[in-house]
Amino acid sequence: MEIRKIFAALMCICLLSGGGLQVYAGGISQSAKEIAQHDPTPAFKVNAKSAILMEPGTGKIILEYNSHEALPPASVTKVMTLLLIYEAIEQGKIKWDDIVTVSEYAAKMGGSQIYLEAGEQQSVRDLTKSIAVASANDAAVAMAEYLAGSEEGFIIKMNSKAKDLGIKDSNFVNACGLDENGHVTSAHDIAIMSRELITKYPEVKELTTIWMDTITHKTARGEEDFGLSNTNKMLKTYSGATGLKTGFTGNAGHCISASATRDGLDLIAVIMAAPDSATRFDEARKLLDYGFANYTVSKGDEAGTDKGQIKINKGKADSVGVIVKAQVSVVMDKGNHVQLESKVEMLDSLNAPVQAGTKAGEIVYISEGKEVGRSDLVCSESIDRADLSHMMKRLLNKWFE
């Protein structure tokens, strides 16, 4: 009797253990992956209220300090403004050569500006360049009105986009970043916005890396050239600097979202509420230097890499090629850098018809025994279902073979 009780207890333990293992047999759950990949942030401080260092390709946060405090962002607000402009261009809602007529309201914006006049006409390209290079408030509001009919309508778009990006510390009240009650964001949210801008629209760097340029004012008095000078002095003092946006007001202090690239590694450093302009740049350099000194990016197979064949049931072809859908990037500590290993997890077969791009499996990347990334494996071409003539021909071929 006692033996049967002991045996029953052991069976229960085994079944419970087996059930727990089966939950993860098909791969680690998303939340578990995030926990497994979490790299505790080293303790550090910067001479500012808030800061963060992020690798934009993966979204990995390397360092952060008080990064979720909602603070006035000054002209770093224009990261969101630029993001919405590039999105509208991509969607075909506006074109670079479109002509914008400047309103009296936009022309009256204070702070940094290019001194647009009411009724003046400028192209979308020159207004966007003025926002990216000279941080022009009047240009930002003119573009907001052009995109949404009014600045108020554009603010709705800004807050809607923030929600889409999953950021929660932000509330936009204007399109340019002038001090206004309730106009706040955080270093974390700015990093997310900056990441979206430079990864989805890398061509923005064509504007954010301009040091000096000109636009031409076109008014009733005639045409007059106006010089633009970049507010981001790191372009001249930091190797690999690619942007992104500075900001300053009395309430916000000195802020920056600084992007840079070295040896294939992209980084974003956000500093908020530094005591002066020089400190803002110094602290951004400190974060970027740390990232470049200690981290590197390892990449998996390129998109389109051949990974064999998968059997097709009842198709006009017996099999189809399988390729990598998207390249995986993994941020790795240089001190513990280990070559990525990979394994292919493929379905046994697919039933025709099969469309190009149909998922056939996954490629899993592993470092030091842990999963660090994965990408879908997809069919390289479409395979139609075999009709009766194809089936008869195939049977005959097998018969004669």
Image (spheres, grey):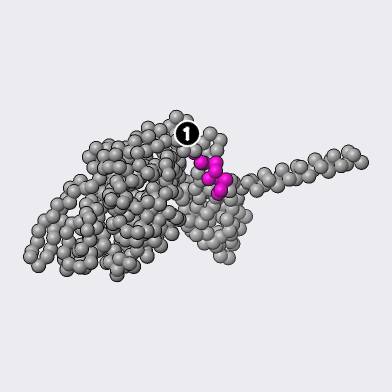
Residue type pointed to by label 1 = Gln
Q: Which residue is mark 1?
A: 339
**Front residue of this view, candidates 232 and 28:** 232
**Front residue of this view, candidates 75 and 33:** 75
Task: Name the residue rendered at 53%, 45% in the picture.
Answer: 34
Task: Name the residue rendered at 75%, 45% in the picture.
Answer: 15
Magenta-drawn segment: 30-39
Q: Is residue 46 visible?
A: yes
Task: Give x and y (percent) for residue 211.
Answer: 20, 46
Res 66 → quadrant:
top left
Task: Name the residue rendered at 28%, 50% in the picture.
Answer: 250
Q: Quadrant of the N terminus?
A: top right
Task: Give x and y (percent) for residue 209.
Answer: 25, 46
**Front residue of this view, candidates 256 and 377:** 256
Res 218 → quadrant:
bottom left
Task: Give x and y (percent) for residue 288.
Answer: 35, 38
* Magenta stretch holds residue 317: no
Which secondary structure dominates the residues rendered in magenta?
helix
Task: Name the residue rendered at 30%, 56% in the picture.
Answer: 179
